[in-house]
Amino acid sequence: MNLVEPSSHFVDVARGRLETGSGRYKKRLKDLAGLYADEAAYAAAVGRNSDLVVYEVTEQRPSADHGDLTFGVTSMRPGRVGDEFFMTRGHIHAPANRPETYYGEAGEGVLLLESPDGAVRLLEIRPRILCYVPPMWIHRSVNTGLEQLVMSFCYPSDSGQDYDVIARSGGMRSRIVADGSGWKEVPNVAYRTRTEEEKAAMLATTVA
Ligand code: MN
């Protein structure tokens, strides 16, 4: 029997990192073209500081084996493009029937979830709130606060990420925008309802 060594990991909330993670990536403003409704505001923001790190992920992926877990920390800067808050690119897992949990460590935000049929759910997250993203839901996190949004996450290691699922439908169905000192959900006018073929293709990725 090949046993993996057990491990413990410090969630560095102040730095927004899993201190001993094996993998790390950053998404900068210039990497996030096409996400925001206000393309002129996006171009202006990129012009000011294209290398601004919008979010950073540190994670530990012990293996990609079925039954194993990947876990880590996402840290996202506060800010907006036009009236739309900074957000992650968002994805559905591939296989799509893989869940995830997010646990609030610092700041406040919203998890924006969308089913293949276009049902939308919003989950507010803040410290000590644990959010469950069930199998088959597209998900994106949005920093609606004035501080860094830090969340730890955990998902099955055999989940890949399909980032193009959102672009194929013209974005997610809802956008999260500023409303006074708070936020509100507004419809994404560019959204295209998925065809039966597109939904079938999402279902076809599922495996036991
Ligand atoms: Mn995910």
Image (cartoon, helix red, strand yellow):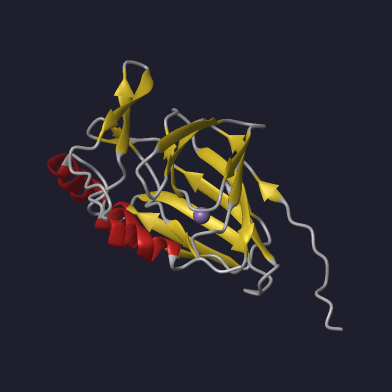
Q: Nearer the viewer, residue 182 or 54?
A: 182
Quarter of the view holding residue 64: bottom right
**Across the whole image, how many numbered discs are drawn on residues?**
0
Q: At which x and y percent is residue 175?
A: 30, 35
- Which residue is outermost to the right? 1
Lateral position of residue 120 relative to residue 67, left or right: left
Lateral position of residue 96 relative to residue 132, left or right: left
Q: At which x and y percent is residue 149?
A: 51, 38
Residue located at (47% from left, 49% from top)? 137
- Which residue is outermost to the front? 196
Q: At which x and y percent is residue 77?
A: 43, 41
Question: Where 168 sits versus 178, above or below?
Answer: below
Quarter of the view holding residue 177: top left
* Residue 163 in sight from this viewpoint: no
- Which residue is outermost to the left? 40
Residue located at (35% from left, 57% from top)? 199
Q: Nearer the viewer, residue 206 or 145?
A: 206
- The N terminus sits in image quarter: bottom right
Question: Where 203 sits versus 138, above or below?
Answer: below
Residue located at (54% from left, 32% from top)? 107
